[in-house]
Amino acid sequence: MQHPRDVLLGSQAGAVTLPVCDHYSGVEARMRKSLALQAEMSEEFGTCVFDVTLDCEDGAPVGGEAEHAALVTELLLAAPAKARVAVRVHPIDHPAFAADIATIAGRAGHRLSHIMLPKVESAADVILAEKALQGASNLRVPLQVLIESPFAVQRAFEIAAQPSVQSLSFGLMDFVSSHGGAIPDSAMSSAGQFVHPLVLRAKLEIASACHAHGKVPAHCVVTEFADAQAMQAAASRAYREFGFTRMWSIHPAQIRPILKALQPSEAEVEIATKIIAAAALADWAPISFEQKLHDRASYRYYWQVLERAQRTGQSLPPEAALYFA
């Protein structure tokens, strides 16, 4: 049996796939709870539905950066073997950056799913981070990048083109504040961030850069962490209107709304399953389905619907589930 991924994706087969949620925590108790929650939900859904990113940039107290990096390293080393755990280090121009890389990647690089680089302005910053990693470890740890300024938005395509980069994330609050008051604080809210033209332009540039290079665009935080409805609405708009396929969580209560927003509907899964099954029976030649022509271009789309359903922990019909056994 030919697998749909092998038949349909072609040059897209090398595109990065990641869990749809990236959950951040920086306080010790919350980091431990995040790791425990990841294990619980992986058991519940049968797959890892969110990454845990341990935060050094905002999590480390000023003056306590070295101690925080050591704590993060110990948590990484103690995490379950199948856990997906990352770290956000300090920016490359911060005095603690080199020590973060040396301590965390040097001792626990083999346990890292990726390293998040904040305040990246250009591809040159990515290359500097790569060199620091090479000095600390022989391992190739994937990099993810935070785009947080107008200059970085301008360079999004060249940053996304770097082979070591998996994903670009949009840093909304830093982006707004980098405009010196020219963008109002309302643009940092869950609803207002979908209104201001400069914010919308930044989101579109980041998503487009990622899709051009087979990388994953990750949407910014929603600070109203107690409002599940606002969280789900923002995640849904980010995915369906702006092409973001991953989203940040800053509170455990945000994880399930993100999963729900980025899941295909049951109807979409049902149609995708029927079309892929019919295509496979036709050896991937064109077919007519419900009086519409389908060929490999649309097969590719419907296969990706099934992949997204699987990554978000949805139950699949048996004829689709067999491809993920």
Image (cartoon, helix red, strand yellow):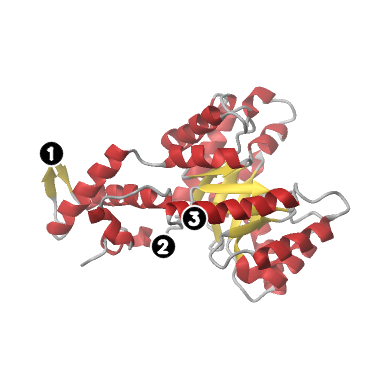
Number of the front mark, 3 or 2: 3
Q: CA distance from mark 3 to mark 2?
A: 25 Å
User: Mark 2 falls on what kind of element?
Assistant: helix
**Which amino acid type is marked by label 2?**
Gly
Q: CA distance from mark 2 to mark 1?
A: 32 Å
Specify the label residue 290 is tagged with: 1
As drawn, 126 above or below 81? above
Number of the front mark, 1 or 3: 3
Residue 118 visible to the viewer: no
Taking depth in this image into account, of 199 and 23 the one nearest to the observer is 23
Density class for disc 2 (Cα within 10 Å; few <14, some 14-19, many ≥20) is few
Q: Are marks 3 and 2 in contact (CB under 8 Å)?
A: no
Instruction: Place residue 70 in its image quadrant.
Output: bottom right
**Which amino acid type is marked by label 1?**
Glu
**Outermost residue to the right:** 63
Q: Measuring 36% from the left and 52% from the top, which residue is drawn there?
A: 307
**Which amino acid type is marked by label 3?**
Ser
User: Mark 3 falls on what kind of element?
Assistant: helix
As drawn, 100 above or below 175? below
Q: CA distance from mark 1 to mark 3?
A: 37 Å
Q: Read off the residue under disc 3.
A: 42
Q: Earlier in the sequence, mark 3 or mark 2?
A: 2
Q: Measuring 41% from the left and 49% from the top, which residue is drawn there?
A: 313
Q: Earlier in the sequence, mark 1 or mark 3?
A: 3
Q: Read off the residue under disc 2.
A: 14
